[in-house]
Image: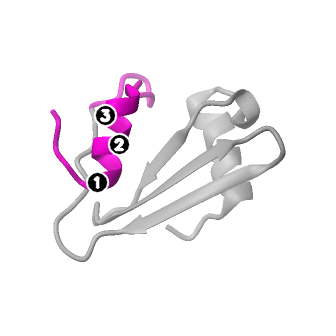
Amino acid sequence: MRRGIDGLSALAESVIKEAPGSGAIFGFRGKRADRIKLLWWDGQGFCLFYKVLERGYFPWPTAKDGVAHLTQAQLSMLVEGIDWR
């Protein structure tokens, strides 16, 4: 989880094949699954949200071609560490 805004936006563009400024929220999880970063463009600049759980891990959706589409409710549960799968 060393990448910052520039590295994550480049990763989103190369792997996910979507422009980082598209308005989508891009999620990244660390190897230990206890930390996530969310990257999005708010119209004026990039925002980066970073969360580390004290215990437990973040559930991660199954991705097709590197992309998982989440509803707003699923994203909220993901950030809270709730397994909705």
Kind of residue at badge 2: Ser
- Please identify the quarter of the rendering in which residue 69 is found: top left
Residue position for label 1: 80
Q: Give, as a single range, the part of the protein colored magenta.
A: 62-85
The reply to whether callout 3 and callout 2 are in contact (CB within 8 Å) is: yes
Q: Position of residue 33 (x, y in %)?
A: 28, 60
Name above or below for residue 24 compared with residue 4. Answer: above
Q: What number is the disc on residue 76?
A: 2
Q: Position of residue 74 (x, y in %)?
A: 31, 34
Kind of residue at badge 1: Glu
Q: How many angstroms separate mark 3 from mark 2 (CA)?
A: 5 Å
Residue most toward the bottom? 54
The reply to whether callout 1 and callout 2 are in contact (CB within 8 Å) is: yes
Name above or below for residue 44 compared with residue 55. Answer: above
- Confirm whether the magenta stretch covers residue 80: yes
Name above or below for residue 85 compared with residue 60. Answer: above
Q: How many angstroms separate mark 1 from mark 2 (CA)?
A: 6 Å
Q: Residue at x 80, y 49 (%)?
A: 45
Q: Position of residue 68 (x, y in %)?
A: 39, 28
Which mark is first along the chain, 1 or 3?
Answer: 3
* Secondary element type, mark 1: helix
Name above or below for residue 15 compared with residue 83. Answer: above
Residue position for label 3: 74
Residue 14 versus residue 74: which sits nearer the camera?
74
- Confirm whether the magenta stretch covers residue 57: no
Q: Residue at x 28, y 35 (%)?
A: 61
Q: Residue at x 42, y 65 (%)?
A: 51
